[in-house]
Each structure stands twice: as structure tokens, then as C-alpha cells.
Image (spheres, helix red, strand yellow):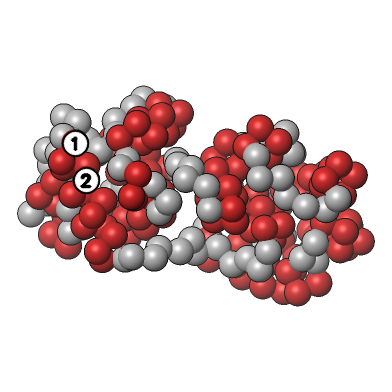
Amino acid sequence: MPLSKKQVHDFFATLQQRNPEPRGELFYTTPYTLLVAVVLSAQATDKGVNKATHALFKIADTPQKMLKLGESGLKEHIKTIGLFNAKARHVIALSEILVRDYDGQIPANRDELVKLPGVGRKTANVVLNIAFGQETMAVDTHIFRVCNRTGLAPGKTVDQVEQKLEEIVPKEFRRHAHHWLILHGRYICKARSPLCAECPVCKLCGYQEKSV
């Protein structure tokens, strides 16, 4: 059952109180390295991506430097990450486009971002939110699960959940909403064994099988 307007407000107010300034867990130094890190993180853990990019970003933190490194050089840095061959192609291709069409800068526009190879709506939303402070909702598997399980923003697809979040999240919480939900899904509202007894929003949650 969907949460009431007051429950939604209290849900985010509680998460904000526990973590006023949430941060993404991917390592990055610039909007460009953030974009690359998010592209590399598809079907991979943040920890695994960070391990690979720590050395990579010391030598290739701009699209120009990434092109100089080349696809084969990039593969050597990211070969521990799943789907590294395809991801290397995407990173080199998007770097070429950034240099050619955007003077090496990252466009602060979703329609432009999703035109880049390997960049989908979720990736674009993450970059817009973290790098440019835009109030986007980047719905990943954690957010999709949390929103459906709790009744916060139920939907059959990630697009439906994103649209619902856009409708219900109060203005004061929109900047950090997706970060709170990702972290909540990653560490508390886990897929197989949600830690309901440790959940700060347990009393607001509509999950029928709470383990408390």
C-alpha cells in the first residue's frame, strides 16, 4: 500500500536526520571521472570500480588524456571489472565525442548525456545530481526494491518508480533523495535479508513480511 503524504515526508526526514549529507561511494575527481566511474559501475560493485580507477584517474582524468591512453591501455586498468571490453569501447567513444563536440566538457543536460555511448538515463541522472547539483532521481536496483517493498513509490519499471519519486518527494529532500534510498537499500533494506530490526523507517514501511 502506498505511503501517505505525511509518511513520505517522515520517511525522508528520518533518513536525513541520520545522514544529513549523503555521498555516493564511487571515487571520482572531476565531472568527467565521475561519468567514467558510473559507466564502469554497470553490473559491477563500487568497491571493484574504485580499486581499478584509483590508478587510472591519476593518468587519465580528462577525455584528452583518456584518448592518449587508448582503448588497450584502458583495458589494462579495468580488466578486473565485468564487461571491461565493452566498457573500454564506450569510454573511448564517449571521450572522442566530448573532445569533438563539447570541448572536453561534460554537458549538464540529460538529453545530451544519454547520447553518449554507454550512458543511459540512470547514469545521466547520477552525473547531473552529483556533478551539477540537479534534483534527479537515479533509480537503480536498490531504489527500485526499496520503493516497491516499502510502498514509498511503487512501480513495475524503473521509469515508473522514477516518475513516482518525482511526484512525491518533498522539495526539501529532492537533492539527496536518491542517495538516501541507495544507501538504505544497500545496507539496510537488502534484497534477501532486510535488516528490519535495524531500520530507522520500519514503522513507516508497508512491507508485510517485516522480520521484527
User: In the figure, is residue 111 to the left or right of 201?
Assistant: right
Q: Which of the 4 quarters of the picture holds residue 30?
A: bottom right
* Amino acid beneath label 2: His
Describe the element under mark 1 as helix, strand or loop: helix
Residue 130 % position (x, y): 54, 56
**How far separated are the C-alphas under marks 1 and 2?**
6 Å
Q: Nearer the viewer, residue 83 or 24?
A: 24
> On the image, numbered disc 1 is attached to which residue?
5
User: In the figure, is residue 41 to the left or right of 176?
Assistant: right
Q: Is residue 65 above or below residue 89?
A: below
Determine the residue positioned at 52% across, 47% down: 134
Describe the element under mark 2 as helix, strand or loop: helix
The quarter of the rendered structure image containing the C terminus is: bottom left
Q: Which of the 4 quarters of the picture holds residue 77?
A: bottom right
Residue 202 % position (x, y): 14, 51
Q: How many marks?
A: 2
> On the image, numbered disc 2 is attached to which residue?
9
Determine the residue positioned at 39% across, 34% down: 166
The quarter of the rendered structure image containing the N terminus is: top left
Residue 115 % position (x, y): 72, 34
Label 1 CA crowd tier, 10 Å (few <14, some 14–19, many 20+): few
User: In the figure, is residue 38 to the left or right of 175?
Assistant: right
Determine the residue positioned at 66% across, 53% down: 35
Q: Are marks 1 and 2 in contact (CB under 8 Å)?
A: yes
The residue lying furthest to the front in this view is 171
* Amino acid beneath label 1: Lys
